[in-house]
Image (cartoon, grey):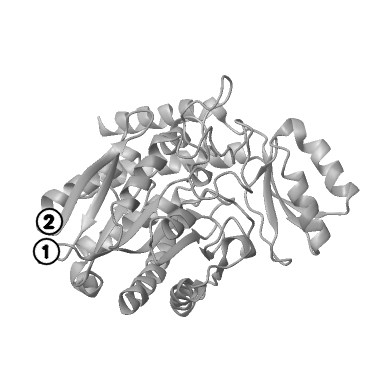
Amino acid sequence: MFLKTCLLLLLCGVIALSAHDYEGYKIYDIKADNSFKKELLLHIAKNTEYDFFNMPRALDAATRVMVQPKDQAGFQLLLNGFALEYTVVEDNLGSTLQKEQLENQSQRLVAQRNAVRSISFTAFHRHAEINAYLDELAKAYPSRVTVQTAGKSYENRDLKTITISNGDGKSGKNVIFLDAGIHAREWIAPAGALYVIYQLVENFVSNADLLKDYDWVILPVVNPDGYEYTHTNSRMWRKTRKPASSSCYGTDANRNFDFHWGEVGASSYSCADTFKGTTAFSEPETKIVRDLLLGLLGRGKFYLTLHSYGNYLLYPWGWTSDLPSDWRAHDEVAQAGAAAIMKSTGTEYTVGSSTNVLYAAAGGSDDYAFGVAGFPVSITMELPAGGTGFDPTIAEILPYVSETWTGIRAMAQKVIEKY
């Protein structure tokens, strides 16, 4: 019976994936070793038919882009015409994604059969499983864990937060707020948030120092509609799922916050991956994050949002290359995280303001947390690339999230020390 269930679920996975199977899609790494070529790539990226995965400023860092079959010949002619060196790092993304999804679904079944909890760190889990895990922790550790439904997504999914304390009953403590999964395809980010939860709750004795004077509030999936859509229809989907126009769906939730909204680095074109939304806070999911942040005024000391990919620890501002007057506080915390990871695993993280390290993008949650909600430290952590970028293999999950926890723990310690 179990084998029949496995086969049925695997078959369903293949059918779901075929809704947008990425057959024949290629992924390129492009070398742009001077500022002119970097600017040229920024111009090329305005073509929404190309999906630019990243756009690092560093001249020694490659830019990665996904191109569908009908555009590949013209795209390569364009690159050759401007003498842009490139390599094809994935010749058929569809084949790779199908293999990865089958492996993930098989491992989910194994984990669910053998594990005490609804999630593991040997597979990427669905949104319902993630919410079930939070509820299980609240039941198992009622003195230290509270789970609340902060609101509903556009498609009526529960956005649940977990509040973790040390159980001493003291109210009004300072708070570290962490969220993940703003961008749907970045599966490793919710996995990272779940590992933080696991460490704080189920490995409490080793991490009690982080909970002595602080509570943690964690929202592991900000964009559950988009996240589910990447599991069932289109693995590389990025946005929310609320209709944006008569022909296109979704808004880039990390361009939708009402702080310098739409000024730079966001698109007004509803079909674009960086569509800013029809208005600031047009999405129910970003309104929920807004209300959570504003509800922590005076208590919120550290806002951390998990994304992927790129090995970055970024801080405000995202809307300008100028730095906030107290940028050193952000930098000190971020540098502590980078140093801890380097010492532990040798992985190098680049630290700096979002605009100066990557690119200008207004309307982000980190700028809003710092500029409006009053969090003295606000950081975006971009976890490393896996697979072709956004698709780490199941074997990469535990190494990535444990490494991420090393950095988060060090940053939290620095915040607790400072505030």
Can residue 90 be seen here?
A: no
Which amino acid is tagged 1?
A: Gly
Mark 1, residue position: 167
Q: Could you say which is closer to the camera, residue 107 or residue 270? A: 270
As drawn, is 141 to the left or to the right of 250? left
x, y (%) of residue 1? 25, 29
x, y (%) of residue 345? 47, 74
Can residue 51 be seen here?
A: yes
In three-dimensional space, the C-alpha distance between marks 1 and 2, rounded to whole angstroms, equals 9 Å
Label 1 or label 2, whichever comes before in sequence order: 2
x, y (%) of residue 28? 71, 49
Question: Callout 2: helix, strand or loop?
Answer: loop
Cβ atoms under marks 1 and 2 closer than 8 Å? yes
The circle drawn on residue 141 is: 2
Q: Nearer the viewer, mark 1 or mark 2?
A: 1
Question: Callout 1: helix, strand or loop?
Answer: loop
Q: Could you say which is closer to the camera, residue 394 or residue 371? A: 371
Which amino acid is tagged 2?
A: Tyr
Q: Residue furthest top?
A: 246
Q: Residue furthest right?
A: 81
User: How many residues crowd mark 2 within 10 Å: few (<14), some (14–19), many (20+)?
Assistant: some
Location of the C terminus (image quadrant): bottom left
Q: Could you say which is closer to the camera, residue 79 or residue 367? A: 367
Q: Residue at x 12, y 53 (%)?
A: 140
User: How many residues crowd mark 1 within 10 Å: few (<14), some (14–19), many (20+)?
Assistant: some
